[in-house]
Every structure is written in structure tokens, then in C-alpha cells.
Image (spheres, rainbow, N blue to C red):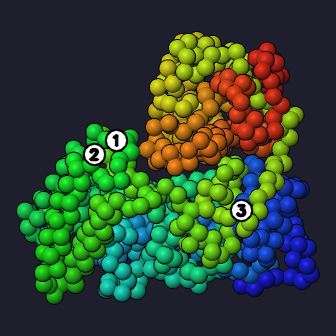
Amino acid sequence: MSAAGAGPPDIRTLSALSTVTAALDKSEERPGQHEMALLVEQAILNKRHLVVQAGTGTGKTLAYLVPALTSGSPVVIATATKALQDQLASKDLPFLADHLGIDFDWAILKGRSNYVCLQRLREVANPDQEQLDLDRIAVTTKAEIDKLAEWAGTSTTGDAAELNWTPTDAAWRSVSVGSDECPGADRCPLGEPCFAEQARRRAQAADVVVVNTHLYGLHVASENAILPDHEVVVFDEAHVLEDIMSDTVGIEISPGRFVALSSTIRRILDDPKTTGSVAEIAETLRDVLSPHVGERLTTSLPDSIQEPLAAARLTLGNASDELIAIETNNEDAKQRRLRAQTMTGRLIQQLDIAVEGREGYVAFVSGSSDSPRLEVAPLDVGPVMDEGVWKRRTAILTSATIPSSLAKRVGIASDLVDAADVGSPFDYESNSMLYCAVHLPNPNASEFRARANDELEALIKAAGGRTLALFTSYRAMDEAAEEMRKRLTVPVLTQREMPKTALVKAFSDDESTCLFATAGLFQGVDVPGGTLSLVVIDRIPFPRPDDPLLSARRDQLGRTAFSEIDIPRASMMLAQAAGRLIRSSTDTGVVAVMDPRLGKANYRWDIVRALPPMKRTRHRSEVENFLRRITG
């Protein structure tokens, strides 16, 4: 791929953008999109990082894709979710290939566990391999495996996203491998036709590679060993970048990993004592970690955890020795041995890291008492990102809502980055209203919930249903839903009742319906039109004060922690929630926040400024009149 067209870069970029947007259905002028495209173009030309907030409706995907493609630079686009990744590869990039007038190749690349493993398929299909314990697999699972094998024979990618049905976890695990288990293409007889390896080869040859941010984090953690060389990286939905990088450059040790390892070893090693001892680690780990769920641990782990980890390390070392000693001429058996060795070796490495207590990292226990996880994460992802990203290539960080402290939190030096907010094309001032119920008591007061329910009832009645009510806890959601069902005649759905996709569809299909949900629906819900006319948020979504990783970061920052961590995160989450309201140029409605701190606290403007520029009011009567007018 080479830079296209003639003339100055800015004219070339805007011309190319106009060409592709003219081909869109309902094409319209978007000044923010043009502004962002020029900013991206200049960032690439000048090799300066860019953090750009682009509100809903801006068309940010084309705003970064067009200048990236016209620049002729190899590009990696990292998205926060696989759904966004699939949308780019199946919709946006093919559209540009048809209308941009530039020849370019693109590829989508995911982690290995997203692709069917041909070697595993061959092993499962071999009835002579007793170690697979096929008799223990449910009949329905066997049928799914047969169906997956048939599909793999016709698929060109082996990507689970291609399936028009959803296999059970047991079936998919039987025909796939994770990155911690795969010994690599050069050690596998089916390494050449391997779907994951084919995807990597396509990525090596492509001008644009689309990955999810988690995989990019693994690329950084592996010292740039996974993805092809690239000059530009775009982080879409960049507001979650710090958290995802913390997850991927740190380690996680859970009981489930030892159960999976025991199963993998059992496929090649007929030694109940060894496989049983590996499986027993899971129970021991669950017992010692469960009392510490939600806790931050000392740098040198407590003896109650350190000693079982050291014993687990010894057990895995013995298992590794037994695996090395296995001799076989059967190729499938060799592959099972290699996978078991690889998985064992990588878990040993992580046990060593956990036991040694790395400087600059914090250990904590996450998950639940039934499924606890020991995590060791960096206090500051900045240094590893500086070495792995910022010093190597130009980065574009974009989202509809970006925390004010993002660049600093991920380690970009202030003199190497530009920041911009290109706004949104929507007329928030005329079409929407931000209401803060300043007369309510503080959310921690005993009378808050009852008073908030009265407020919620009045607002929903004025809106005629049409409400998305978002809560910061399941308990608050359940209590409000129970109370509203007593008081209202409109249907009230909650997040507990059905999967997200079905839930949003049921809400969208009936204008009178109300949907009550928690933080999981603060983002990713797109319901344009009159079905959603009121978004209610019960309180400012500050992060939990007892979050172990964030508490360690707060301690590190000291007095500035609240302004550098809590306020930016709360602002971003509240802006994401408020962003559910206006999804098109004709949408109208109200965002109501029950938390009076939004109107009274000395930090209130830091949060309000992060929200769309809606008309503001403290008077419920004004809100009720507005709702009746737009829904009547």
C-alpha cells in the first residue's frame, strides 16, 4: 500500500474522506469527523501521539481509518472488544476497499483460542486414543464436536466468529488450544495448515491488521513477538487501555488453570498420582485464596499463600520431568506431550513471578470465594508501554469518552502527545437535558433509597416508560425494580432476566418498557429513537474504595489520587452511561442523576465537563414538562 492521490496531505485526506462518506446511506456533513481526520493525519506525518475524544455520531472509525490508509503506513487497529474487531473487518474495511480508491490488504488476528485447532480435531477424531476420555464426554458434546469438525472442513479461517451457532465451552475446548498450551507451528505436524498460523501469515502480509486490545497487550508483554511490524497503532475505545494493559502484562493464577492442566496432562500421562496431585492444587489454592477475595496482599505473599504456591511449583516440576521422560513414536501423542509440557512450563514461570514478589507490582485476590484468582499487576503500566509502544511507533488513542488523565496514566510524556476533543454533531443543548436531583440526601444516607424511588417513579411516569435506569450495584437495581413494579403499570425488565442481546431487543421493541441494569450496560447499548427517552443514574459511579489494585495506586500517588484516579474514572463511566441517551440526530431525552454531589461537591465541574453539553436543570417540574412534550 502506498499513499494515494496528489496535492497537500490535508487536501488529500479530506477529499478521500468526502469520497467515502458520500457513498454512505444518509450521508451528512460532520465537521468533527473532518477535524479528527486532519488531526490523525498530522499525528502520523509528525510522528506525534494523539489522544482524541470524538463524541457519539462523529464517525470516528472513518476519521482514523481514512488518514491511516492514505498515509501508506503499516497500521494495527486495537479495539476493546471482539465485536468491534469483527465490525471493522466485516463492514468498515470492506466498505473502504470498495470506495476509497486505494489498494490495500487487511487482516483480522485473534488469540489462538478463537480458532479451531486442526491437531486437536485429528486427535478427537481418533477412536484409539484412550487418553482423551471420550466416553466421559456427553453425547450432546460429541455431536457438537462432529459439527465443528464438519464446519472446519469448509471454513477458510477456522474463526469461531464465523459460526452461526454457539458451541458449548466443553465442545470448543475439545477442538481448540490456548496460547499457553500451543507448542508452536514449527513443532506441530499441522503447523502449516493451522488456522491460527494462517491468520498470523495473513497479518504479516497485510497493510492493516485488526486485533483486540487484549491481544495487543500480550504483544507488548511478549516484547513485540506476536504482531507484525507497524508504524502506527490506533487504540479504539481507549478509555479501557490502562485496565486491559494491567491485565495482560501482569499474571493471573487461578484454581481453574490447574484443573485444565491436569486434564491436559491426563491425555498423555496415564499416572493418576501425578494428574491427581496437579488437580489437588486447585482445591488447595481455592481454600487459601478464598478468605482474601477483594484484598490486596503484601509484596512478600503471606505464608498461607506462599507455601502452597511453592509446593505447587515443586509438583509441576515433577510433572514436567515425567512428561519429558515419555517416549513415543505416535505423532498425535507427541503433540499431546508437547502441549502438556508447554502449559506446565508457562504456569511454572507465573508461579515463580508470584513467589518472588516483583518491585513495582501489586498482588491481590480477585473473583469470588468459589472462584478466586491471584493476580499480580503493575502499579504503573507506563514504563512497559513506553518501551513497547510509545518509543516504537505513533499511537492514536480515541473514544467517545476519554479520562482527562489517560495519557499520563499510560505513560505518554506530555511533550510527545497532542490532545483534542472534536465534539459531537448532535444538538445536545436543544434535544437533551441533564437533571441533578440536588434536593435528595447523600447516597450513603439511610433515607436516600426511598427518596430516590419517589423521584424515579415521577420521572418514569412523565416519560411514559421509555427508561433505562442504571445502578452501581445489583442490590440497588433489585430494590428499585421491586418497588417500581408495585407503583407502575409499565413493564420493568432487569438485567437478571435474560441475556444482554435479548434484553436490549425486548426493551427496544416496546416503547412503554423500562430496563433496569448495572454497570455492565453503562456502555454498549445502542437504542436510537423514542424507545429510550430517559436515562436515570442512581449515583456517581466512583470506583470502589477497596479495589485492591486501585488502592495500591492511590497509596502511590498520595494526596493527588482522588483527582488522578477516582474523578477521571467516575467521569468516564458517567459519560458512558449518559451516552446511551442520544444515539442519532433526532433523538431527544433526559439524563437524570440522583446523586446530589453532581450539583454540590467541589469537584462537580470536573465531572460535568466530561458529559455531553446538555441543557442543565435542578428542577424536576422542568424535566417532567420536557419529557411529556417529547413523548406525548
**Residue beneath disc 1:** 293
Contact, mark 1 vs mark 2 (Cβ under 8 Å): yes
Residue at screen point 32% across, 46% down: 372
Q: In this rendering, would 512 be left or right of 251?
A: right
Question: Which residue, as the protein is rendered here, is positioned at the far front?
Answer: 559
Q: Which residue is mark 3?
A: 414
Front residue (pair 58, 229): 229
The kind of residue on which mark 1 rests is: Val
| Cβ atoms under marks 3 and 1 closer than 8 Å | no
Q: For the residue marked with disc 3, what is the amino acid?
A: Ser
- Circle 3 packing at 10 Å, graded few (<14), some (14-19), many (20+), is few
Q: Residues within 10 Å of mark 2 (few under 14, many from 20)?
A: many
Q: Which mark is residue 527?
A: none
Where is residue 550 shown, x and y percent of the image? 50, 46
484 up-or-down from 51: above or below: above
- In which quarter of the view is residue 470 placed? top right
Q: Quadrant of residue 441?
A: top right
**Residue corresponding to mark 2:** 289
Left or right of 50 in this view: 472: left
